[in-house]
Each structure stands twice: as structure tokens, then as C-alpha cells.
């Protein structure tokens, strides 16, 4: 699919694929390092999701519980183990980031994302 400028519309998708290209260039046989890269994306997803939950939910412990449930989902571990599933982790990070940014901030003592 091409947009009006003649550039491929899937540029964002190719950026996600770029993480695999970088991994292959740096560690051509390093499957464990590539899985560690996936684990980094999972950690980023959990941190962003916790921050979004913290802003959305009323009791603070509910945000921790929601993030814990997300962390224990088996699909996340499959995505870390399967190197080609990194796109789902990256897109989930951006979805959680969008939800966090779009949610109205709830004032919490000492924890504010606004200056």
C-alpha cells in the first residue's frame, strides 16, 4: 500500500522489523541475546501498563494487581521466547503508551507525570 507521497504505508512495520535486523547484524547466532531484547520490550510494556493502570484506577494496589496479572500471562512469555513475536511486544508497548498518555491524570502524592 502506498500513500499519496509514493512512500510505503508500512514504514512503521519496517521499523519494527529493524530491531530484528540490528539483532542479526550484532549477534548473528545469538538467540539468547535476541530473547533478552524481547524481555526488555516486555519489561517496558509492564512498566508502561503499570503507569497507565495507576492513572486509571482509584486504589493504588489495583494498579499493581493489574500489572501483576499482565506479567503472568503466558502469551507474554511465548512472545519473549519466540524471537519473531517481538512485533506484538513492541505494538503492545505503543498501545499501552497511548492509553497512558490519553488517560486523564489522577493526582497521587509524589507520583505525577506532569510538571
Image: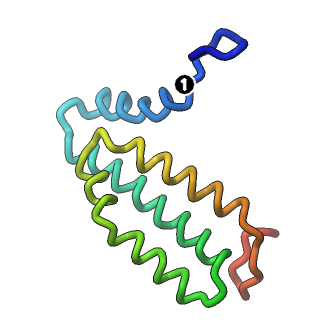
- Closer to the camera in the image, 29 or 59: 59
Residue that extends furthest to the front in the rendered view of this protein: 1
Residue at image position (41%, 41%) is 87
Left/right of residue 20 with respect to residue 60 in the rendered view: left
Residue that extends furthest to the right in the rendered view of this protein: 115
Q: Position of residue 4 (x, y in %)?
A: 72, 13
Left/right of residue 74 with respect to residue 57 in the rendered view: left
Q: How is the image coloured?
A: rainbow
Residue at image position (50%, 46%) is 91
Position of residue 114 relative to residue 59, above or below, is: above
Position of residue 87 relative to residue 5, above or below, is: below
Callout count: 1
Residue that extends furthest to the left in the rendered view of this protein: 29
Q: Position of residue 97 (x, y in %)?
A: 61, 56
> Where is the N terminus found, in terms of image quarters?
top right
- Closer to the camera in the image, 32 or 83: 83
- Closer to the camera in the image, 42 or 40: 42
Q: Position of residue 100 (x, y in %)?
A: 65, 63
Left/right of residue 50 with respect to residue 77 in the rendered view: right
> Where is the C terminus found, in terms of image quarters?
bottom right
Q: Position of residue 5 (x, y in %)?
A: 71, 12
**Which residue in the structure is indicated by mark 1?**
10
Identify the secondary structure beneath mark 1.
Answer: loop
Quadrant location of residue 73? bottom left
- For label 1, the crowd category at 10 Å Cα-Cα, with few meaning under 14, some 14 to 19 and many 20 or more, is few
Amino acid at each position: 500500500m502506498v500513500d499519496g507521497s509514493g512512500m510505503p504505508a508500512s514504514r512503521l512495520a519496517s521499523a519494527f522489523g529493524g530491531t530484528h535486523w540490528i539483532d542479526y547484524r550484532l549477534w548473528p547466532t545469538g538467540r539468547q541475546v535476541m530473547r533478552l531484547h524481547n524481555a526488555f520490550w516486555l519489561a517496558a510494556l509492564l512498566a508502561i501498563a503499570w503507569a497507565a493502570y495507576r492513572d486509571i484506577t482509584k486504589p493504588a494496589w489495583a494498579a499493581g494487581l493489574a500489572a501483576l496479572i499482565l506479567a503472568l500471562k503466558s502469551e507474554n512469555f511465548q512472545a519473549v521466547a519466540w524471537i519473531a513475536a517481538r512485533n506484538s511486544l513492541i505494538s503492545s508497548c505503543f498501545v499501552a503508551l497511548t492509553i497512558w498518555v490519553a488517560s486523564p491524570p489522577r493526582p497521587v502524592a509524589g507520583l505525577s507525570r506532569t510538571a
